[in-house]
Amino acid sequence: MEYTEGVRFDSLGLSPEVMRAIEERKIEWSTPVQTGCIPPMMNWQDVIAKAPTGTGKTFAYGIPIVEHVDPADESVQAVILAPTRELAIQITGELRDIAAYKAGVRSVCLYGGQPIGKQIDSLKKRPQIVVATPGRLSDHMKRRTVRVDTAQTVVLDEADRMLDMGFIHDVTRLLDRMDKRKNLGMFSATISREVMDIAWVYQRDAAEITVREDEQNKPDIKQFRMEISQNEKADAIARILTETGFERCMAFCNTKGATERITKFLQMRGIDAECIHGDIPQKKREQVMDQFRRGELRVFVATDVAARGIDVDDVDIVVNCDVPDENQDYVHRIGRTGRAKRQGVAVSLIADYPSKMRIDDIAQKTRNEIIPVRFDESGKLTVEES
């Protein structure tokens, strides 16, 4: 069933403790995906939800999970699988917000790149909710540091991405172990063949929820392209920020080396910039993300994999230093801006002919208008004459 509107949270029959946590966030109305998913998940029904990024999926499954947890039971009652450590950390933070006034509800986040001993200590506190990347959860199960066969609810978040990243065998093995579950929720931006296969094998009479990227849900993002030479990219970002006065910028590169170079050149120009990519230690990545969330960094430079799951909802502008190879990555990148009903801006820097071909293809396939801009003689940003 397709959902286009929200309802008031106080009409969903939630506990006073969860309502208090929601009201503290000054939220009154659910998003369409929350409207569609909360009632069936509260009734222990399987759910398969197709919804764009940034539509509130964590609350859609997090609220029913927190409501169902029995604080007196110290066994694992819910497991949420996420494709990346960043998304797992973000989900855990949101669950803790939802459970802020539910005494005795504990959650743990398990992911690679963090010392396993620290996670084992957290597991000794008997959390009822486990948020994990599939590989690290499998490691803990092999070490017998966690038992998940008691889980009643299992959620696959960003299921399409998780299966694309080669986790399908880990995911199916884990689902086979969690055979006492009452419901399975699958949340995905696209319903791929692999997602359908998992749904067919592991779900029964699932409630199907679709949230279209219509004008109400689609972020309002002005998209631009700028042709420059390869060595002018950092200058272009600096000049765009000076011109616009924007304070929070995310810049995306295709390679680790490019993120390092762009960051260094921005720092040389006196701009507060830091980067994350796969080779940067997890602790440092978390520090950089926290700095950006707190508004202490003007520019946050990242590769697609490293940035996956970072949820910062007030980015003024996204800059594609390199045009991504996949159309879906372009959509995910620019979706960092234009959230919460604000207009966002995205600029793609075009330094060679293959990039020009890619941006033309993206504009056509995603049905987006990407307007050419340049700096005029006086250094002002101006729209190219067609």
Image: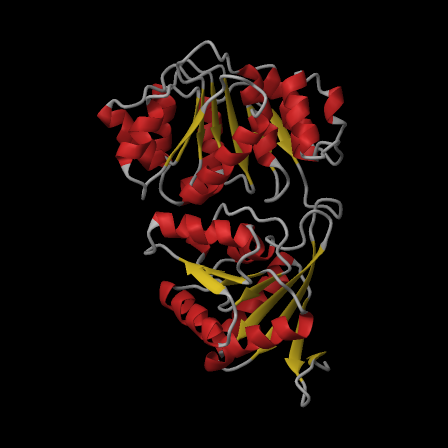
Counting from the top left corner in percent of width and height, residue 308 is at: 47, 49
Q: What colour scheme has been applied to the protein in the rendered image? A: secondary structure
Quadrant in the picture for the C terminus: bottom right
Instruction: Find residue 19 and report its image quarter.
Output: top right
Q: Is residue 1 visible?
A: no
Give the residue at x 35% y 42%: 166
Residue 200 locus on image (x, y percent): 48, 26
Residue closest to the far left: 143
Q: Residue furthest top?
A: 72
User: Which quadrant of the structure image shows residue 349?
Assistant: bottom right
Residue positioned 25% across, 22% down in the render: 144
Is 168 on the left or on the right of 369, as rendered?
A: left
Q: Position of residue 335 (x, y in %)?
A: 60, 53
Q: Is residue 302 left or right of residue 137?
A: right
Looking at the rendering, which quadrant does residue 240 occupy?
A: bottom right
Q: Is residue 132 above or below residue 323?
A: above
Instruction: Name the residue: 45% across, 32% down.
Output: 197
Q: Is residue 193 left or right of residue 260?
A: right
Residue 359: percent from the left, percent from the top?
56, 68
Considering only vertical position in the picture, is 149 above or below 265? above
Q: How many marks?
A: 0
Drawn side of residue 134 relative to residue 22, left or right: left
Closer to the camera, 147 or 268?
A: 268
Question: In the rendered image, is residue 251 in sight?
Answer: yes
Image quarter (top left, top right, bottom left or bottom right) of the N terminus? top right
